[in-house]
Amino acid sequence: MTVSTDTQFVHLAWQQNEKELAAVRYQMGADPTGKVSRMFGVYDDATGLDLRGTFIINPEGKVLGMEMNYYNLGRNIDELMRKFKANMYLARKTNEACPSKWKDEGDKTLAPSAKMVGKVHEALQG
Amino acid sequence: MCETTPLKLGQVVPNFELDTYDPKTGDFGKFSLAKQLEKKRWTILFFYPADFTFV
């Protein structure tokens, strides 16, 4: 879901007016007091607005991913989805790790062990 | 104003609720983290500065 310090009424007006948002199917959260935004450290007291923060929370409620960008830099959805998929994969494969180039299931993962110390290059090739 | 320490990576998020607009139903609603976790769902929170600006 998305969250800003706008109210749900403004979310409605924006979603119904902006053609770029016509296909939106996610809930748009309203945090006008900034309470939830402060909890995640994205609330900017100077402006009353939220910074561009993204958080991945697993079904146990644990924060597994955070990313924060300043006002003038948009986020890359492909990278967010890569991290989201990787987190879901790793929840099932708890002894594996997804390297930076991991994109989707079937891609090379690493299973950290004593044998791999100093041999990550070889492990990535293998 | 009370200062809260923001969450860190790996911490469990305390429950929270938010009023929402849901474009799927065209209606207002509520998001509850507790309900989301009851359903064993993953959650992505995507904060942005303001409606009617680029996101």
Image (spheres, coloured by chain):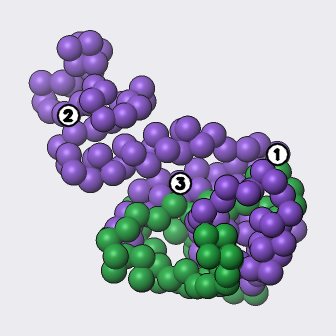
> Is there any visible trace of residue A29 in the rendered image?
no
Q: Which amino acid, mark 1?
A: Asn
Can you give x and y, in whole percent of width and height, for residue A118 in the image? 24, 19
- Of the 4 image quadrants, the one containing the N terminus of chain A is bottom right
Rendered image: mark on residue A112: 2
Q: Which residue is mark 1?
A: A72
Looking at the picture, does residue A78 appear above or below residue A63? Answer: above
**Circle 3 is placed at which residue position?**
A66
The hue used for chain B is green
Q: From mark 3 to mark 1, how far is it between C-alphas?
A: 18 Å
- What separation in Å lies between label 2 and label 3 (alpha carbons)? 23 Å
Q: Residue at x 46, y 40 (%)?
A: A82
**Dot 2 crowding, Cα within 10 Å, few <14, some 14–19, many 20+:** few
Query: Could you tell me the amino acid type at mark 2?
Result: Pro
Percent coordinates x, y for residue A116 in the rendering: 18, 24
Q: Residue at x 66, y 59 (%)?
A: A24
> Disc 3 is attached to a residue of which chain?
A
Residue A112 % position (x, y)? 20, 34
Q: Earlier in the sequence, mark 3 or mark 1?
A: 3
